[in-house]
Image (cartoon, helix red, strand yellow):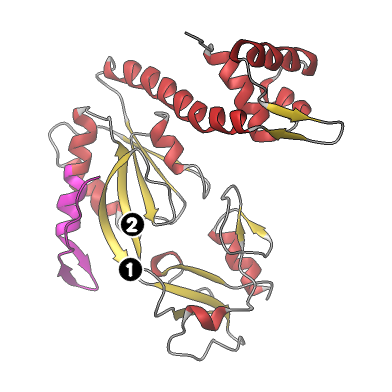
């Protein structure tokens, strides 16, 4: 049976992510020759080349692509196992919640208030992340629960419950050709410049890269692009910007997510509190009961 040590897999993943031995060596805080030698040892042990190297670039082979896909899951699983073991023995452990800034649709204060009434409630530490890695926080154990947006965040390997569903709006400058429309269709946005989100592969955007909603709104105000976001992230709209409903855009769902292998009572207690808060939300002075969603 061929085995790789965790450290060797971390070396491989760094090079696979960077596709550059120098940058990977800096990231790992080791010398580049030592990293190159370690990768050659891994390839010899596996009996397949993992990278195609030239003087100008580094590419993954099909074998390297396969190892990168499964290697990331393996490292996440190891990290999650270590974190879970440590926290299982800590009777005073805080509960860690990850979300993006402003990414709670106004629900978090109600959820925390509901959770505070649980007999086994713990202190909740709030962690903020970028647009691409909240799911990884849950998979590798850095966070216990997270507020994610479907269908944009990767929910693979996560259990989740929908807390809130909403439409999406196009955010445009007040003088934009679509600003006076009551609603638009996705086809109306053809030819417009949309953002590229930092760390998020794929997508339709071809405009400048942005790391968060604050950067996006600033670029829209400058007339560099427009954006399409869940309504709660941008309303009320900042001065000079207009939100126009996109009638045929798939709805966005705010979900509470956690690792599908999670079994600790402190997580179950928080999930229960969030579902209670979901069922008794107050919006504009009236109580609205949201439909239930099945747990994945």
Look at the numbered discs 1 and 2 and tell me whether their residues touch, using CB distance below 8 Å: yes
Part of the protein shown in magenta: 272-296
Q: Secondary structure at mark 2?
A: strand
- The location of residue 79, given as percent across then percent down, is 44, 22
Query: What whole-number distance in Å separates the C-alpha atoms at marks 1 and 2?
Result: 8 Å
- Answer few, some or many: residues within 10 Å of disc 1's Cα (few below 14, many 20 plus, some between 14 and 19): some
| Residue under pointer 1 | 166
Work out whether mark 1 precedes mark 2 in sequence or the reverse, and give the earlier one: 1
Q: Quadrant of the C terminus?
A: top left
Q: Which mark is residue 145?
A: none
- The location of residue 218, given as percent across then percent down, is 63, 67
| Residue under pointer 2 | 254
**Is residue 280 covered in magenta?**
yes
Drawn side of residue 220 relative to residue 83, left or right: right
Who's the residue at 50% across and 70% down the image? Answer: 228
- The location of residue 18, given as percent across then percent down, is 69, 34
Who's the residue at 15% across and 68% down the image? Answer: 287
Q: Secondary structure at mark 1?
A: strand
Observer-nearest of 119 and 192: 192
Residue 44 vs 208, above or below: the answer is above
């Amino acid at each position: 049976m061929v085995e790789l040590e965790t450290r060797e897999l971390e070396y491989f993943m760094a090079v696979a992510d960077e596709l550059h031995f120098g940058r990977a060596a800096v990231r790992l805080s080791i010398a580049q020759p030592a990293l190159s030698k370690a990768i050659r040892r891994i390839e010899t042990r596996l009996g397949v080349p993992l990278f195609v190297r030239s003087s100008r670039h580094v590419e993954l082979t099909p074998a390297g692509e396969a190892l990168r896909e499964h290697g990331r899951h393996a490292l996440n699983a190891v990290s999650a196992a270590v974190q879970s073991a440590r926290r299982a023995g800590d009777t005073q452990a805080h509960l860690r919640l990850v979300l993006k800034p402003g990414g709670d649709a106004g629900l978090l204060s109600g959820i925390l208030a509901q959770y505070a009434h649980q007999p086994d409630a713990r202190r909740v530490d709030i962690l903020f992340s970028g647009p691409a890695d909240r799911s990884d926080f849950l998979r590798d154990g850095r966070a216990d629960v997270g507020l994610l947006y479907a269908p944009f965040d990767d929910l693979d390997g996560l259990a989740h419950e929908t807390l809130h569903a909403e439409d999406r709006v196009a955010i445009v400058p007040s003088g934009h050709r679509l600003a006076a429309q009551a609603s638009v269709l996705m086809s109306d946005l053809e030819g417009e410049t949309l953002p590229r989100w930092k760390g998020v592969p794929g997508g339709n955007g071809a405009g400048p890269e942005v790391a968060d909603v604050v950067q996006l709104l600033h670029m829209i105000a400058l007339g560099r692009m427009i954006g399409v976001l869940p309504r709660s992230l941008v309303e009320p709209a900042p001065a000079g910007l207009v939100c126009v409903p996109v009638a045929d855009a798939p709805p966005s769902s705010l979900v509470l997510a956690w690792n599908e292998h999670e079994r600790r009572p402190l997580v179950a207690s928080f999930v229960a509190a969030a579902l209670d808060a979901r069922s008794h939300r107050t919006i504009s002075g009236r109580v609205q009961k949201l439909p239930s969603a099945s747990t994945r």
